[in-house]
Image (spheres, grey):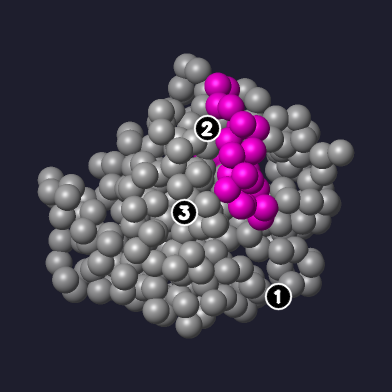
Amino acid sequence: MQSIDRLSHNQITTNQWNLREAVEGCVRAGIPWIGIWRDKIEEIGLNESKRIVRDAGLKVSSICRGGMFPAATKEERQKRIDENKRAVEEAAELGTDVLVLVCGPSPGKDIEAARKMVEVGIEQLVPFAEEHGVKLGIEPLHPMYAAERSVIVSLAHANEIAEQYRPEQVGVVVDVFHVWWDPDLYNQIKRAKGRILGYHVSDWLVPTPDLLMGRGMMGDGVIEIHRIRKAVEESGYDGPIEVEIFNHDIWNTPGDKVLERMKKRYLEYV
């Protein structure tokens, strides 16, 4: 029988809540995992964030986000490495071994140079992350985000970078919203065997109301979520499954109602 033992509330789904509210909501809903965003940690501080999560007995599936490596100057690129090191430290303190990397857009028109900056940034970060027991999860984004959020836009490219390292150092995050369209998806999931560090779910609405804020609740769109889940499991992933939804209508809905709907749709469609 299906259960919610692996269900994780990526707290962007109830972005109207601060971390304390999100944690308390998970406890009320019986959701055992939470994926935490760094801006929510910053609001109340790392020590208080750690205390709240620990006292609630929740498990942290990941910290979002690291990355954003490309920048126009060497100095700015170094600042971003330093910021990523702080993200690694936060992940370690909060008890998760996964830092999700949204790798960043190009600072100019040279997208190939930006992709090289991503590779160099990850290379610089790996030793520090390994020292802290944290794995780097490269999350490829949908190609429509290439200019604003990430120049890594396919699971194939994420795999190519991750394969330069040991699986316990660098892996990939499979987010259905970003990869469902890819004709080579299932081959690339097989290729990622042993280094899938996260599975994120939502749905692709038709018509799509907004490129950033238009994600839907599972079952409201066109993604074969369960088929993709089976594929990532066949490639060795048995960790938490994060529900990550950017949608103003959902953000404007009372959080407890969102979590109850999330549980129902998780059991039905994931």
> Within 10 Å of the Cα at label 1, are there few (<14), some (14-19), or many (20+) other Cα atoms?
few
Q: Nearer the viewer, residue 44 or 258?
A: 258
Upstream in the sequence, badge 1 or badge 2?
1
- Residue 179 image position (x, y, % from top left): 45, 36
Q: Amino acid at mark 1?
A: Arg
Q: Amino acid at mark 2?
A: Arg
Using the image, tell me which numbered label, if any, was put on residue 51: 1
**Relative to residue 28, is residue 206 depicted above or below?**
above
Q: Nearer the viewer, residue 204 or 240?
A: 240
Q: Amino acid at mark 3?
A: Val
For this orientation, the residue located farthest to the top is: 207
Q: Is residue 113 left or right of residue 80?
A: left
Is residue 229 shown in magenta? yes
**Relative to residue 108, is residue 146 depicted above or below?**
above
- Residue at x 33% of width, y 34% of height: 144
Which portion, as a residue range, is magenta? 221-248
- Residue at x 65% of width, y 25% of height: 219
Residue on which disc 3 sits: 172
Upstream in the sequence, badge 3 or badge 2?
3
* Residue 230 figure quarter: top right
Is residue 192 shown in magenta? no
Upstream in the sequence, badge 3 or badge 1?
1
Residue on which disc 2 sits: 215
- Residue 67 image position (x, y, % from top left): 37, 61
Label 3 to label 1, Cα distance in Å? 29 Å
- Residue at x 21% of width, y 58% of height: 116
Q: Nearer the viewer, mark 3 or mark 1?
A: 3
